[in-house]
Image (tube, rainbow, N blue to C red):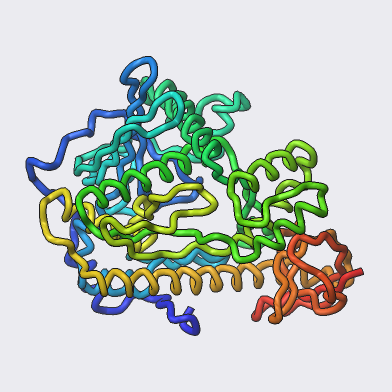
Amino acid sequence: MLQRGLLPDFSKAVLREVDTIDGPAAVSSPEIRDLRHLLWCSIDNDDSRDLDQLTFAESLDAERVRILVAIADVDSLVEKNSAIDGHASTNTTSVYTAAEIFPMLPEKLSTNLTSLNEGAERLAIVIDMTVGADGVVSAGDVYRATVFNHAKLAYNGVAAWMDGDAPPPEKLAAVKGLDENLRLQDRVAHALRGNRQAQGALQLETSEARAVYENDNLVDMRAEQRNRAKDLIEDFMIAANGVTARYLENKKFPTLRRVLKTPKRWDRIVTLALDLGEHLPEEPDAGALDLFLQKRRRIDPDGFEDLSLTIVKLLGSGEYAMVLPGQEGEGHFGLAVRDYTHSTAPNRRFPDLITQRLLKASIGGRAVPYDNAELSALAAHCTLQEDNAQKVERQVRKSAAALLLSSRIGQRFDAIVTGASEKGTWARIWGPAAEGKVVRGFEGLDVGDRVHVKLLHTDVPRGFIDFATV
């Protein structure tokens, strides 16, 4: 982390500031609505403790549903230019490694006082959306409110219940009416996703490897799969981020947008499609790419995750960009949306905290808290630090995988090429999920090629895993 400009520890100044905070934010203002009575709940990973958002649904009529997303009001305890804010603005993100989590904010805040914890009253920014049966968001508003989390739920348990594979989780069953509300949320999420797909949003299926421990011993790196509950939260967050961007635009405020530019390696995507007997246009076209992906999912469901991983690598990384009022943003190629910001995870991402400050200023009729030069510099810095954090996470993940593979030198694996450039060629294997460098037989390989590799060498401290094609 230090080599990449990230701070692993909080300074004494930060810790002194944290010591002066003895409770959650409590603000009395006519602009803060009391929404504690609504059936709010959180859905996150089983081990998540920094809860950034709650959701709720309400039927308006036969066609329209009101979706509310409550976002933790982190700004009320983390003042701009404070020591805590300085640490957060340096790292710009929490760093989640297989060995340890390095939170952007001290845990006294992120997992307690600024977290939307179960059974706790908290201040929040509420994103209020009206969604039609066709998945179109017809109206949106943003305001401040007090909320109460009635149930802390986990993705896997909720998904198993929704799919009919398990009874409702105990906490879900304990709250009267919450099951019906979640069924309604699921239906709206499906409509939102369908509308995005009709606009050309890419339906990819990728997974991230997570460390699995037994009695504090690392035993596996296991790929986490998507499920219905994860899709629900993702669909709501994408919609909420769109409403946020448009709200600030209407208020004539600048925004910090999340953009994914037109892919530079579209030619390679076209070649991959041709290899599979399909034709894509010469110019990048998200709609055509999605139709190709869905056809491949039907034809080769077992190989779809490999194809998805390949496309993700070729699409490139997202980045942050400042957009002025009235200015046309680049949009997000993969999501097929033009208005998109990051606003729903202020405990974990600094861009979301920036957006929250912009929202609160616009709601309260105050001046923009950042000037244009500051926002532009922050956009570039957040992009850089996100990349650095991902490199640290990848490095530790590789070290964990190297540790698991160190006793398997000489074994052979099925693999897919995930990177090919002048810097080298990389391939991913499964069981354990791991990525390594192809140091022999890499000539002519490109992203998406399926190969057989033999494990030659591992270096745990440096996270090196070396393969040769066979």
- Count of picture labels: 0
Image quarter of residue 325 = bottom left
The residue drawn where x is 45% and y is 38% is: 153
The residue drawn where x is 58% and y is 49% is: 286
Horizontally, is 396 left or right of 415 in the view?
left
**Residue 199 visible in the snapshot:** yes
Q: Quick one: 52 or 257, which is closer to the camera? A: 257
Position of residue 116 relative to residue 373, above or below, is above
Image quarter of residue 37 = top left
The residue drawn where x is 50% and y is 59% is: 260
**Quadrant in the picture for the C terminus:** bottom right
Q: Quick one: 161 or 365, which is closer to the camera? A: 365
Q: Quick one: 5 or 188, which is closer to the camera? A: 188
Q: Quick one: 130 or 276, which is closer to the camera? A: 276
Horizontally, is 351 left or right of 81 in the view?
right
Percent x, y for residue 434?
71, 64
Percent x, y for residue 210?
61, 57
Q: Residue furthest top?
A: 62
Image quarter of residue 31 = top left
Percent x, y for residue 44?
46, 44
Percent x, y for residue 301?
76, 40
The residue drawn where x is 33% and y is 69% is: 88
Q: Residue furthest front?
A: 282
Q: Residue furthest right?
A: 470
**Residue 110 visible in the snapshot:** no
